[in-house]
Image: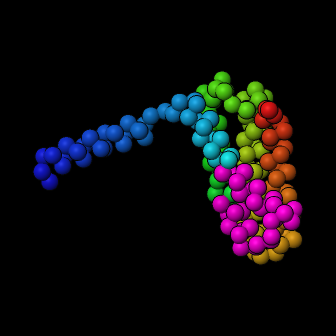
Amino acid sequence: MNLRKKICFAATLLLLGAAVGAQPKPEDAVSYRKGIMRGMAWNIGEMGGMVKGVVPWDQKRFAFLAARNAALAPMAREGFTPDTAQAKSNAKPALWENLPNFDERNQALIDASTKLAAVAQGGDAAASKQAFIDTTKVCKGCHDKYQEKH
């Protein structure tokens, strides 16, 4: 490897190391969690349309959306860092005062989303619809308690 390539390689490693070790700004963490929530809402929205009969039922598509939602669910909590308590967001102060409860609700969301994906993969439309309803109840419960309405 010539000297120029070695220098470029070393610089790249330093930059990657700095990026990996850097703490995100609170606003970035809020943006991250909002992005994850938007992704979940995208999937939930289409599944909800199918459950309500507004969108034609497509079990394969429903299972795909449920699996994608289950993949996103564990990611949301990562954006609720303590330094975001004072950042501009829709999180109520009660969230930061009740983090153990918030964590329990987050785990319930992960569990419900995982179950929804498994049920949907099984191909039973009625069971899929019920698992969807159960999952959205978990979402609503947390939003009602910890999200400001605008």
Q: Quadrant of residue 20?
A: top left
Judge whether residue 38 can be spotted in this image. yes
What's the residue at 44%, 34% (across, down)? 22
Name the image quarter holding the C terminus: top right
Q: Position of residue 123 (x, y in %)?
A: 77, 76
Image coordinates for residue 42, horizontal then vertical, percent: 70, 54
Which quadrant holds the N terminus? bottom left
Q: Which residues are magenta?
A: 39-68
Q: Identify the residue shown where x is 77% and y is 44%.
A: 105
Horizontally, is 77 left or right of 150 in the view? left
Is 102 within the magenta?
no
Q: Would residue 45 appear left or right of 4 to someone viewing this image?
A: right
Residue 128 location in percent, x, y? Answer: 81, 68
**Residue sitting at x 87%, y 62%:** 52
Residue 43 position, x and y percent, is 71, 57
Main secondary structure of the magenta stretch: helix
Q: Is residue 43 magenta?
A: yes
Camera-nearest residue between 145 and 53: 53
Q: Nearer the viewer, residue 130 or 101?
A: 130
When the figure is inspected, residue 87 is found, relative to residue 48, above or below; the finding is above
